[in-house]
Image (cartoon, grey):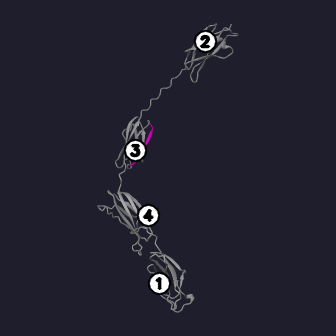
Amino acid sequence: MAFLLTSCGGGGGSAGELGPSTRLRMQPSLETATQTAGTFSDVAKISQGVRPYRVSSDDISKVEARILDDGTLRIFGKLPGETPVTVTVYDSSVNQGPPIKLKVTVQALPPLHTDPIITDLTFYGPGGRFAFTVSGGMPPYLVDGTELGTSPDSTTFFTVRCVNPVGNFCPGHRYVVESNDVSEEGTGSFSITDQYRFATPPSTLKVNVTVKPAPLPPAMVLNPAEISGAIGTNNTVAISYGKAPYQALTSNASVATVTVSGQLLNVNFVGAGDATITVIDASGQTATVKVTVPEPPTPPPPPPVTPDLAVSPTAQNLSTLGAVVTFAVTGGKAPYTASVADLLDYKELVQTTVIGSNLIVARTTTACTGASRAIPIQVQDSGSPKQTVPVIVNVACP
């Protein structure tokens, strides 16, 4: 069935036969147009010919058309379809020229959807929260439904609201679902409906919601549960679970002091002894840390001081063959050794023997030329590093 609308604008011109230069015109000249369902567009201007203009649609269920007073051709997209609908514009001349034909295709609205896409939500109350945006279809949208059939006392387990509403409108179509404080599990749903007036029924999305009571928090844990350290040092203990803020107390401040920084205990070891640090969270839970600070170790005794190696007396005389002199050796580290300086024939004149702490020097020959001689003897201990001292044996020569 054709749909015929006549503009309300006044007529004008002659109803006689028109020449080519005054024939009905469309500006811009279109042969096809596309319109989204549920919307309208002013697509062109109709001029010349004889007013009033008339317009018809081959399928009014899909496309409507009107010509406004100023000659504007307005197209209304109603139901989408793949087959174009012909819109025809006529003028009122007696001998009409060819009408103007425009083929209009109505494209579907984008499908109604949420971003992110949701069909099922599960929350722990209170405080569960999920934000989403609605798009597609034809806004404004109707978003509601907070009744939960499984609740024996009709408790509302969740709410759906617009983010930053303006009056009854939701700019940006941004919504949030929030769980309420509940003592039992509840289930329900909410719906999102668009306002496309040509659709029967309009597009609708359904989101299922489950709200569960918040689980009990795990017991507070302190790690490590036992610490030890030397006086003047410190250690840290990590707090897991529980509910911030935390408070920490020490049973013996002369042994250990404690401060809290977020979820860390900072423990300073002050003096020797035992102490217990107790942590209390915001819900009243407690946990403890055992602290042990040992007595400082006894410093080792200083190493013994070894006296310097010494020989007494420092010089003696050997006059005759077979004569013997004895020196006393002290200090250094036994056992001791002695040797005659390797000079000329000194080794031929005397012989050295060390017995315990006695250095014995004997005259072994009287052979001696020149003046009397002072023979140096080196006495050495067994320490590391070794000590050496000289003694003198005066040998008379004939």
Q: Earlier in the sequence, mark 2 or mark 1?
A: 1
Label disc, if present, on residue 117 of the rendered structure:
4
**Alpha carbons under labels 3 and 1: distance apart:** 82 Å
Residue segment shown in magenta: 232-241
Q: Earlier in the sequence, mark 4 or mark 2?
A: 4
| 216 magenta-colored | no
Q: Earlier in the sequence, mark 3 or mark 2?
A: 3
Label 2 crowd (10 A; few <14 / some 14-19 / many >=20): many
Disc 1 secondary structure class:
strand
Read off the residue under disc 1: 56
In this view of the protein, which residue sits in the foreground, 177 or 248?
177
Disc 2 secondary structure class:
strand
Front: mark 3 or 4: 4
**Alpha carbons under labels 2 and 1: distance apart:** 150 Å
Tag 3 near tag 4, CB within 8 Å: no
Residue 207 percent across, percent down from the top left: 39, 64
Report the amino acid beneath label 1.
Ser
Label disc, if present, on residue 391 of the rendered structure:
none
**Alpha carbons under labels 3 and 4: distance apart:** 41 Å
Front: mark 3 or 1: 1
Read off the residue under disc 3: 222
**Alpha carbons under labels 1 and 4: distance apart:** 42 Å
Q: Is residue 79 left or right of residue 186?
A: right
Disc 4 secondary structure class:
loop
Label 4 crowd (10 A; few <14 / some 14-19 / many >=20): few
